[in-house]
Amino acid sequence: MSISEMLQQSAILTVLGMTVVFVFLWIMLVCINLVGRLVHYLGWDKDVQPPKQEPVSQEITAAIIAAVTEYRKSERGHK
């Protein structure tokens, strides 16, 4: 087998491999879109109840503000 035949065979295999990968990715994209439409059609993408958020007390907020202020003061002293 000569060099030119080997290069020709490798080019064919490269194009064939790239085509197989491209077709696989295209099929996967189509399937993902179809599943997305199905989920949206069946209403599975909607939350039944919004997540509950508990209010943060003023004491906790004050403690966080004090901690951040102390941290910033200590960082200025180290610079």
Image (cartoon, grey):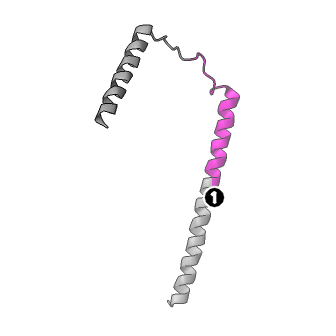
Where residue 32 sits, quadrant-wise, is top right
* x 40%, y 8%: residue: 59
Vertical comparison of 39 with 61: above or below: below
- Does residue 18 appear left or right of residue 70 in this picture? right
Q: Residue furthest left?
A: 78
Left or right: 11 in relation to 76: right
Reading the image, the residue beneath label 1 is 23
Which residue is farthest bottom? 2
Is the residue 12 above or below the residue 19 in the image?
A: below
Front one among 10 and 53 = 53
Most frequent secondary structure within the magenta stretch: helix
Give the mark count: 1
Residue 40, position as x, y percentages in the image: 68, 30
- For the C terminus, the image quarter is top left
Dot 1 alpha-carbon crowd within 10 angstroms: few under 14, some 14 to 19, many 20 or more: few
Q: Quadrant of residue 63?
A: top left
Amino acid carrying mark 1 in the image:
Val
Start-end of magenta stretch: 26-50
Judging from the image, what secondary structure is the residue with disc 1 in?
Answer: helix
Residue situated in front as seen by the camera: 14 or 58: 58
Task: Tell me the residue at 63%/24% (across/down).
Answer: 46
Q: Residue at x 29, y 35 (%)?
A: 78
Left or right, 52 with respect to 27, comes to left
- Residue 39 counted in the magenta span: yes
Q: Going 58% across and 15% down the picture, which residue do you hit?
A: 49
Q: Is residue 24 magenta?
A: no
Above-or-below relation of 75 to 9: above
